[in-house]
Amino acid sequence: MRATQIEAILTRLSQGGVEFLVIGGVAALAHGSARVTFDVDVCYRRTRENIERLCEALASLHPTLRGAPPDLPFKFDVATVTTGLNFTLSTDLGDLDLLGEVAGLGEYTAVQAASETLPLYGLPMRVLTLEGLLTAKRAAARRKDEEAIVELEALLELRKRPPE
Amino acid sequence: MTDPHAVPLASAQNASAVERAMAFGVDVTLLIENLRYSPTERLRRGEQVLASVVAFKEEVQRARQRQKGKM
């Protein structure tokens, strides 16, 4: 196992002109979560042009399907991404999940509407809001997300409190 | 014997989100600390924690292998 390099992955996507939204554990981290996250989750716009940019930005990172048998044929290219929707990948920079749609929110445009621009690593990046994260986590209704939901609700409340 | 620090279930619904988180076992002091940093600093700190966790896991694995080798 290797630590995922969040900065390297996000800056590569951003500088590659990929239209993407930071979601999941990294978005929660950016909002103040104290939970360790092992992968980077992003929602990507599913247009032909954007999928081309996405594939180009990630090509040199040798993406493979995480957890799949090594002999399973997989080529990360425009045809594959167009045919599929959500991909859980291992890359040279760590684990990266690409989502075409997010539970509770929908496709890129709906997720974008629930996101805000945050300056990350000196670049403006769209990040799912705390409220958006809560909607997605509640919709997923996974037992493992119970603590995350409670934490996100606390963060939301703490942010509304006047500074001490 | 009851835990004097436990939040009674009856009051959990009326509790604030922070109180509910504390009752759930979330370390709220970490959240308050994180909110003092910028989003980028929070991510960098998260990456450092992750790197430490991964390094620790690897060390545990190596120690187990060394122990196996001795047996």
Image: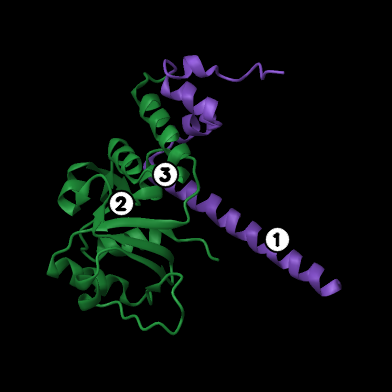
Residue A141 in the figure: left or right of residue B46: left
Q: Name the image quarter holding residue B1.
A: top right
- The spot of residue A98 in percent (x, y) is 31, 62
Amino acid on which the number 1 mark rests in the picture: Val
Amino acid on which the number 2 mark rests in the picture: Val
Q: Name the image quarter holding residue A129.
A: top left
Chain A rendering hue: green
In this view, A123 is above or below B60: above
Label located before the other in sequence (2 or 3): 2
Amino acid on which the number 3 mark rests in the picture: Leu
Between A119 and B30, the one nearer to me in the picture:
B30
Q: How many marks?
A: 3
Taking the view exactly as shown, the residue that stands out farthest to the left is: A48
What number is the disc on residue A29? 3
Chain B rendering hue: purple
Q: Secondary structure at mark 2?
A: strand
Q: Which residue is mark 2?
A: A22
Between A141 and A161, the one nearer to me in the picture:
A141
Within 10 Å of disc 3 (Cα), the crowding (few <14, some 14-19, many 20+) is: many
Q: Secondary structure at mark 3?
A: helix
Output the chain of dot 1: B
In this view, A48 is above or below B44: below
Q: CA distance from mark 1 to mark 2?
A: 32 Å
Taking the view exactly as shown, the residue that stands out farthest to the right is: B71
Q: Quadrant of the C terminus of chain B?
A: bottom right
Foreground mark, 3 or 1? 1
What number is the disc on residue B60? 1
Residue A135 in the figure: left or right of residue B52: left
Q: Secondary structure at mark 1?
A: helix
